[in-house]
Image: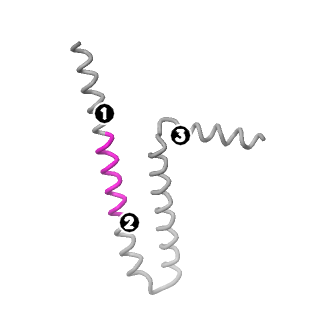
Amino acid sequence: MKESATRVRRDKAISKGLTIEEMRTRMIVNTIKIKMEQQYLIASIIPGQSSVDSALRSNMSRFEQFMKYATITVSAFRIGKKAFEFIRNLKK
């Protein structure tokens, strides 16, 4: 019972300020990173897979960069929207 109580506290601490969508996105990105590292380790042990691994790694890094830019764009849009509403409320 004590373990479940600590899990709840940890979950609340982790999710503070994040939406469910953001947590799911982070979970997906982290899973992809783990898979990439697993493939890298397998490729370093087994020779002959470096070309496939490098292609996969470059595609995944491109996807990761795209996700970072998308996150920045959405965040900037939200901040701009809140600033615009704040200024509009000041004029009233």
Outermost residue, left direction? 91
Q: Which numbered circle lies on residue 79? A: 1
Residue 82 in the image, given as x and y percentages of width and height: 30, 28
Q: Distance between the residues labelled 1 and 3?
A: 20 Å
Look at label 3 and name its amino acid: Ser
Of label 3 and label 2, which has the lower sequence position?
Answer: 3
In the rendered image of this protein, does residue 59 appear above or below residue 71? below
Say what secondary structure mark 1 lies in.
helix
Outermost residue, right direction? 1
**Residue tagged by mark 3?**
15
Check if mark 1's residue and mark 3's residue have beta carbons within 8 Å: no
Q: In this view, does 38 lie to the left or right of 6?
A: left
Look at label 2 and name its amino acid: Met
In the foreground, 90 or 6:
90
Outermost residue, bottom direction? 48
User: Residue at 38% of width from left, 75% of height from top?
Assistant: 54
Majority SS type along the magenta span: helix
The answer to if 9 sits in the magenta stretch is no
Report crowding for label 1: few under 14, some 14 to 19, many 20 or more residues within 10 A (C-alpha): few
Residue 11 in the image, given as x and y percentages of width and height: 60, 41
